[in-house]
Each structure stands twice: as C-alpha cells, then as structure tokens.
Image (tube, grey):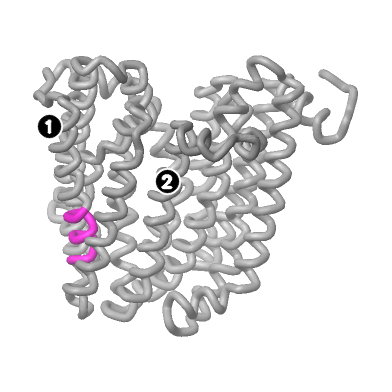
C-alpha cells in the first residue's frame, strides 16, 4: 500500500476515498492525542495528581462500559452502510437500529453503574466523579463515526471531533480550578461530545435526507444477538490493554494511581502504532493474499520490518527520554512515573511483534481464532497483573503488561504454526529464504 501511495499523483491521493478516510481518521486520533497531552498538565496543576488519578480511573471504568455500548457496531455498522450507500431507506433503518440499540445499552450501563455505586457501595473513593462521567456513555451511543466510515465521507466527523475536543479544552480552562471540581472533568468531556453528536445527527436527517424512527424491540434484540461475538472480542481486548489501572486501584492509593496513569497514557498513545499500521496495510494485503501470495509475503515482510524498526526506535527513545517527557507533562519530576514509563516504553514495540500474526489471521478471515487468542490474552493479563501488583505494586503491574504483549505474540504464533501452516512457512520463507514449504 505504501509503495502504491508513493506512485500516485497528488490528484489521485486527494481523490482516493480510502486515503481520505485514512487521513481523516489520522486527524481524529491526532486531535485526541494532542488535546489529551494539552489537558494533562492543566488538570494536574488544577486538581492535583491524586484527583487526576481518580478522574482517569473513572474514565477507565466508563471506557470499559463503552465497549458494552458500542457492542461491536464499530465493525458491523460500516459494512452495512457501505453495502447500502445509495439506498436511503436501508440507511435509515440501519442508523435508527444501531443508535437505538446503543442508547438502550447506554441506559443499561448507567443503571449498572448507579446500582454498583449506591446499592453495593462500590467505587466509594471516586463515586461522585464516576456518576458525573456517565454522560460519556450517551456520547458514545450517539457518535455516528461508523456511519461516515461506511459512506467513505470522513471529513465532517473528523472536523466535528476536533471541535468537540476544543470545547472540552475550553471547558476545563474555564471551570476546572480546584480539586473539588474534578467531578466536572469527564462531565464536560461527555457533554461537549454529546452536544456535537446531536448536531451531526440533525445534519444527517436534514442534509442527507435520512429518516430516524424507533425500531421494534425484536429487531433491536436480533441486532444485539448478531453482534455478540464482536462485542465479546472487543471487550476482552480492551480489558487486556486498558484494565491495568483498574487492577492497580485495588492495591494502591490515589497518588500512585495518578503516577501510573500519567505513564500509562503516554504508553497508550504509542501503542496505537501497531494498530494504525495494520489498518494502513490491511486492504492491499488482503488483495495480494487472494491474487499473488508471493507478493503478499514480500509486502508483509517489508511492512513488518519497518514496523519493528520504528517501534524499536520509539521504545528506546521513550525509555531514554522518560524524565524529560514526565517533567514536560506534569511540570515536575515524578520519580515513580518515570520508573513506570521506562518499563512501559517497550509495550508498543512488543505489540509490533504481533503485526504479522494478526494480519495473517485477518486476511484469512480467522475471526474465531482471533477471538480465542483475545480471551487467552485477557485471562493471562488479569492473572499476572493481580499477582504481580499485589506483591510489587505499580512496578509489578508494568512488568505484567509487558509480559502480556509477549504472551499474545507467542499464542498467536502457535495459532499460525499449528492451524495456518501456509502463513507460517510463507512468511518464514520470505524472511529467511528457506525452501521448506511444510
């Protein structure tokens, strides 16, 4: 894909819808990262490290429930829309069904949080912050990103995302000045996103002539049933990657949570690298796999090699620059955060190791194998994280997260070797020139 991009003229680059989508998705991720990096020092200075940790802990809980609200529609929704791009009636049914289903799930998630917080006295240390964060569930339910992905028209949604994040930044500057105002942080984030999403939905209705209606309960239930496997896969993957802060909350105080949260946020930004690479090369890799397997393996070899080199450079740079990065973001030297970041800096590189395995399973449409590996990854992460965190605290959790990336690489490699020998030997031969074909 990269070779083809380089050979395109400027006009072709601008007009190609896939490239436009990739660029606008990049804008969305970049704006999210930039606003996050800008807001971190502002919040730490305004509410303190301990409240910052609780705000991020609440956000981690909400993001986990957002997997329930999303319910895999981020994968199935774009496909439905793409198939029916020119059929307004079917598009109306699709968007009505999905948004209605997600709103129902947002309501269920809110009730679960309220019952857990007030009925079972959970989340006691950050209950108020968490309850004020539930608006984020409804912003997720009304986000029509999947709709514009399917239409291959990402410009509007990317601009809207930047606008909502800027509103959030203005909100925290104007209204968040003291530790006891920490509860409004995620509320403002959810409120600005929800408001902008409603504006987009109005635009879809009036400018694009898409109708909205309330689907029958049976249709919603059938839609949820169809998406169950996608939801479970997304859930366990999210827990594996983002569940560390929740595990730490059972063994550490608010200050430690804040220290770890700062390092983890930086790592999560860097960990986007392998996923972005997979998204970038997946379309061309799929075509080559179907039409020219030798070219597919050569293409995969080049992409994989560059990914590993870039991932290693990023890991080493982040490790060496940890003191400067933490000081720049927190405006003070936080030794614990520096120690956490030095270890976690290698997580993105280790995740890059699995790019070839994941791409191989994707091009062969091995969804069930991906699902099984996701569950194994989650089980390993929770077991090791709880064990090491209970003994060594935040440092133990860092090593557990590093070990999880190694584990999923090994598991995926075994799946490739035992169940997809054509992939294993094809890629091995492209790397080492072996004549063995298995």
Q: Residue furthest bottom?
A: 332
Q: Quadrant of the N terminus?
A: top right
Q: Is residue 187 magenta?
A: yes
Q: CA distance from mark 2 to mark 1?
A: 39 Å
**Residue at image coords 78%, 25%:** 425
Q: Nearer the viewer, residue 155 or 303?
A: 155
Place of residue 148 in the rendered image (x, y in percent of width and height, measured from the top left): 31, 33
The residues colored magenta run 184-192
Q: Residues within 10 Å of mark 1 (few under 14, many from 20)?
A: few
Instruction: Give 107 or 7, whichever is nearer the viewer.
Output: 7
Q: Kindly indicate the quadrant of the structure image that contains residue 169.
A: bottom left
* Label 2 crowd (10 A; few <14 / some 14-19 / many >=20): many
Residue 86 position in % (x across, y down): 28, 17
Q: Where 229 sits versus 171, above or below? A: above
Judge left or right: residue 194 versus residue 343: left
- Counting from the top left corner in percent of width and height, residue 182 is at 22, 71
21 left or right of 218?
right
Q: Kindly identify the residue that appears in the image at 32 percent across and 30 percent down.
A: 73
Q: Does the rendering let one see residue 305?
A: yes
Q: Secondary structure at mark 1?
A: helix
Which mark is drawn over residue 206? 1
Q: Which residue is mark 2?
A: 239
Between residue 75 and residue 81, name the one nearer to us. Answer: 81
| Residue 127, quarter of the rendered image | bottom left
Give the left or right position of residue 180, taking residue 228 as reference.
left
Q: Give the residue drawn at x 67%, y 64%.
A: 316
Q: Nearer the viewer, residue 160 or 145?
A: 160
Residue 171: % across, % down: 20, 67
Q: In the image as oriented, which residue stretches furthest toward the left?
A: 214
- 48 versus 199 height, above or below: below
């Amino acid at each position: 894909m990269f070779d083809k991009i380089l050979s395109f003229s400027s006009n072709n680059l601008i007009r190609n819808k896939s490239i436009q989508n990739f660029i606008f998705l990049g804008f969305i991720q970049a704006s999210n990262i930039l606003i996050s990096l800008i807001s971190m020092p502002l919040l730490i200075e305004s509410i303190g490290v301990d409240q910052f940790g609780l705000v991020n802990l609440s956000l981690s809980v909400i993001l986990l429930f957002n997997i329930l609200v999303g319910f895999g529609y981020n994968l199935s929704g774009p496909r439905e829309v793409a198939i029916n791009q020119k059929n307004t009636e079917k598009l109306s049914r699709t968007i009505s069904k999905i948004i209605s289903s997600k709103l129902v799930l947002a309501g269920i998630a809110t009730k679960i949080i309220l019952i857990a917080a007030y009925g079972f006295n959970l989340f006691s240390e950050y209950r108020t912050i968490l309850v004020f964060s539930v608006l984020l569930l409804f912003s997720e339910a009304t986000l029509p990103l999947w709709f514009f992905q399917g239409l291959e028209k990402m410009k509007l949604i990317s601009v809207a995302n930047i606008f909502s994040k800027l509103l959030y930044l203005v909100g925290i500057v104007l209204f968040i000045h003291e530790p006891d105002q920490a509860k409004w942080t995620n509320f403002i984030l959810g409120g600005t996103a929800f408001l902008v999403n409603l504006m987009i939905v109005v635009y879809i209705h009036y400018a694009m002539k898409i109708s909205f209606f309330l689907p029958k309960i049976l249709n919603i239930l059938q839609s949820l049933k169809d998406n169950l496997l996608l939801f479970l896969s997304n859930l366990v993957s999210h827990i594996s990657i983002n569940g560390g802060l929740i595990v730490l909350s059972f063994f550490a105080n608010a200050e430690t949570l804040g220290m770890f949260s700062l390092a983890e946020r930086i790592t999560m930004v860097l960990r986007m690298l392998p996923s972005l690479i997979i998204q970038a090369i997946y379309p061309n890799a799929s075509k080559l796999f179907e039409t020219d397997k030798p070219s597919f393996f050569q293409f995969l070899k080049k992409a994989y090699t560059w990914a590993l080199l870039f991932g290693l450079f990023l890991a080493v740079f982040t490790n060496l620059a940890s003191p400067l990065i933490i000081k720049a973001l927190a405006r003070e030297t936080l030794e614990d955060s520096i120690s956490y970041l030095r270890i976690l800096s290698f997580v993105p590189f280790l995740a890059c190791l699995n790019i070839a395995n994941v791409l191989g399973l994707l091009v062969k449409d091995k969804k069930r194998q991906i699902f099984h590996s996701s569950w194994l990854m989650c089980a390993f992460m929770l077991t090791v994280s709880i064990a090491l965190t209970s003994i060594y605290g935040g440092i133990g959790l860092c090593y557990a997260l590093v070990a999880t990336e190694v584990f999923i690489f090994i598991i995926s490699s075994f799946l490739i070797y035992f169940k997809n020998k054509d992939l294993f030997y094809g890629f091995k031969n492209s790397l080492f020139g072996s004549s063995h074909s298995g």
